[in-house]
């Protein structure tokens, strides 16, 4: 790999192109289509991917504001030390470090408040909010099924429905402006697909909570990858939005750097790390999850996430395993 090319790439802060209004999307990577490319190639590079190590997920003792993050994850104060140790003791193992960060507009589809619901409504027995999604001309969007098929279509005793009486006017406008609310109305060709959306507290709102924990070890060479700016689609993974329709630039960047192995650390094991691992396996990467360098949101989904990642061929290791590895020849 050319040193100049790497320098050019790592000098930039990458803004992810999942915005519904952005025209600068980078390609049409679809699930599985590139799975064989990386695995059969001579790529040997290794990347460390930090998931969402930013104020909005941090405990108060480590955030830059001294406040709990808006989507505080238990144990984030202690995970910083683990991640720092890996970087400081075994930085030699990684050709590049990517910090993937949530970055949501107001009234984002993943915010419970957008739908007039209490935060974590998906944990109250009805699972996530049913939504319908579609990729149209390279722009993914989703709409709550309630608004597509009408309130009569939903048995709200059994599935989670928006509380329309409790939605602000701004939020209502935002939800109904989603292209999917139109596009999925008469979906004769079944181009829309159904999924569920977890209902989070308002979190990582753009320009409101953009700090990172001061004690987190970073360097100017880190690639900062912001994701989740499409108001109509959530994005847990560093590679693509949750519909896996609109890629972030990450795959292209890693290909250019000839990266084949990814070490995943950070939060949350059961969401961002899981989705990133799945998308990375789809794209042919060798994936290593450093389990005690991650923290999770929910105990039940944590166990399920580990099982799924292992089934998909990701390897689970611990920080001590990484610290015991030798630096590659020529590195220090
Ligand atoms: C942060 O959250 C924890 C757990 O809920 C709580 O004990 C603590 O008091 C909170 N800190 C602040 C500054 O509000
Ligand atoms: C109304 O919405 C707010 C969020 O905007 C939420 O905190 C509250 O719990 C909701 N009220 C009810 C009755 O669901």
Image (cartoon, grey):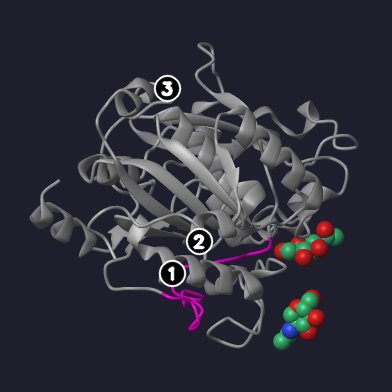
Looking at the image, the residue that sits furthest to the right is 157
Q: Are marks 2 and 1 in contact (CB under 8 Å)?
A: yes
Q: Residue at x 74, y 38 (%)?
A: 304
Q: Is residue 258 left or right of residue 286?
A: left
- Circle 1 residue: 89
Quick check: is the Cβ at mark 1 less than 8 Å away from ligand 1? no
Q: Is residue 235 left or right of residue 42?
A: right
Across and down, in percent, residue 249 comes to 30, 46
- For marks 2 and 1 on the same chain, the one whose residue lies earlier in the sequence: 1
Q: Quadrant of the C terminus?
A: bottom left
> Tag 2's secondary structure?
helix
Give the alpha-carbon distance from disc 2 to disc 3, as whole Å.
32 Å
Give the alpha-carbon distance from disc 3 to disc 1, as whole Å.
35 Å
- Circle 2 residue: 323
- For marks 3 and 1 on the same chain, the one whose residue lies earlier in the sequence: 3
Residue 32, label in figure: 3
Give the alpha-carbon distance from disc 2 to disc 1, as whole Å.
7 Å
Q: Is residue 23 magenta?
A: no
Q: Is residue 202 magenta?
A: yes
Q: Residue at x 62, y 34 (%)?
A: 310
């Amino acid at each position: 790999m050319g040193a100049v090319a790497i320098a050019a790439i790592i000098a930039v802060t990458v803004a992810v192109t999942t915005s519904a209004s952005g025209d600068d999307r980078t390609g049409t990577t679809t699930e599985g289509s590139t799975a064989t490319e990386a695995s059969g190639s001579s790529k040997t590079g290794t990347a460390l991917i930090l998931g969402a190590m930013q104020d909005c997920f941090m405990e108060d003792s480590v955030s830059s504001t001294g406040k709990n993050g808006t989507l505080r994850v238990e144990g984030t104060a202690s995970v910083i030390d683990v991640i720092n140790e890996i970087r400081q003791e075994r930085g030699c193992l990684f050709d590049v470090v990517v910090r993937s960060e949530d970055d949501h507009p107001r009234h984002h589809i993943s915010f419970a408040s957008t739908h007039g619901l209490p935060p974590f409504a998906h944990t109250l027995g009805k699972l996530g909010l049913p939504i319908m999604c579609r990729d149209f001309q390279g722009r993914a969007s989703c709409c709550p099924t309630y608004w597509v098929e009408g309130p009569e279509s939903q048995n709200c005793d059994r599935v989670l429905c928006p509380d329309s009486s409790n939605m602000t006017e701004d939020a209502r406008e935002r939800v109904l402006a989603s292209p999917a609310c139109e596009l999925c109305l008469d979906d004769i060709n079944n181009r829309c697909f159904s999924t569920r959306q977890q209902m989070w507290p308002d979190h990582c709102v753009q320009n409101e909570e953009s700090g990172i924990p001061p004690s987190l070890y970073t360097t100017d060479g880190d690639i900062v990858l912001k994701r989740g700016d499409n108001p109509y689609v959530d994005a847990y993974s560093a590679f693509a939005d949750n519909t896996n329709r609109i890629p972030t630039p990450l795959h292209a960047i890693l290909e250019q750097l000839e990266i084949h192995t990814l070490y995943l650390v950070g939060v949350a094991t059961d969401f961002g790390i899981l989705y990133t691992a799945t998308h990375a396996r789809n794209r042919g990467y060798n994936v290593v999850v450093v389990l005690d360098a991650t923290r999770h949101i929910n105990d039940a989904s944590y166990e399920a996430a580990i099982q799924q990642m292992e089934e998909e061929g990701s390897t689970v290791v611990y920080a001590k395993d990484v610290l015991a590895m030798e630096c590659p020849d020529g590195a220090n």
